[in-house]
Image (cartoon, helix red, strand yellow):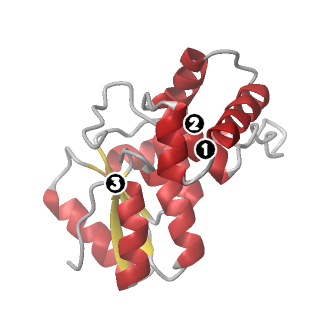
Amino acid sequence: MVAECGNGRQLLEAVERYRPAVVIADVSMPELNGIEATRRLKITSPATRVVALSNFADEAYVQGMLDAGAVGYIVKSGEASDLIYAVRNATRRNAHLSEEVSTVARKIQRAAFKGDGTQSAPACTLSPREREVLQLIAEGRSGKEIATLLGISITTVKCHRNKIKEKLGVDSTAGLTRHAISKGIVRADKEFENR
């Protein structure tokens, strides 16, 4: 093990510094969740393999991590040997999903195709920066806090917030938070200790 990180931003810094072969990423990290961190990690360090680790095997989390580029997904309630197996498989460039996650992944795959065999239309997509702002909003951060964390102006934060609301058809912060929870961007029961 070369590094341990408390949030998604620290994870990206550690990957940049150490270029590890495998990263075990918690899906529900504060400031930058595991899904967004994995997306960015795969751009800056494509050879690094990501194994997701989570308390949950919800569709939103599983689909988000797999779409972002994770090669494994393990639930924390599983056997320790499952995590070891996933890491070993990742170093061999193979995928591994825990049993609960495999069931969910098959369900997602079936749902991605209509009865006629064509893929269903993709949902509205937010830019990486919009997803980042959405997560911070859902974590209860103020506009000023978001601006400071991201190194942007409060006006830019407001512009992102308005674009996100428009894209999602949502008109309130509560609606944005509900959307973030439903898509696995944040967990409803998560305490964000690093605030």
**Residue at left 78%, top 37%?**
114
Q: Are marks 3 and 1 in contact (CB under 8 Å)?
A: no
Mark 1 vs mark 2, CA separation in Å: 5 Å
**Residue at left 57%, top 36%?**
134
Specify the amino acid type for callout 1. Arg
**Residue at left 69%, top 42%?**
156
Secondary structure, mark 1, is helix
Q: Earlier in the sequence, mark 2 or mark 3?
A: 3
Secondary structure, mark 3, is loop
Mark 2 vs mark 3, CA separation in Å: 16 Å
Q: Earlier in the sequence, mark 3 or mark 1?
A: 3
**Residue at left 27%, top 32%?**
191
Q: Position of residue 136 (x, y in %)?
A: 49, 38
> Mark 2 sits on what residue?
134
Mark 3 vs mark 1, CA separation in Å: 16 Å
Residue 48 image-quadrant placement: bottom left
Quick check: 125 above or below 170?
below
Q: Residues within 10 Å of mark 3 (few under 14, many from 20)?
A: many
**Which label belongs to residue 131?**
1
Q: Are marks 2 and 3 in contact (CB under 8 Å)?
A: no
- Can the viewer see residue 190? yes
Q: Position of residue 93 (x, y in %)?
A: 45, 80
Specify the amino acid type for callout 3. Asn
Q: Are marks 1 and 2 in contact (CB under 8 Å)?
A: yes
Q: Position of residue 69 (x, y in %)?
A: 54, 64
Specify the amino acid type for callout 2. Leu
> Mark 3 sits on what residue?
7
Residue 121 image-quadrant placement: top right
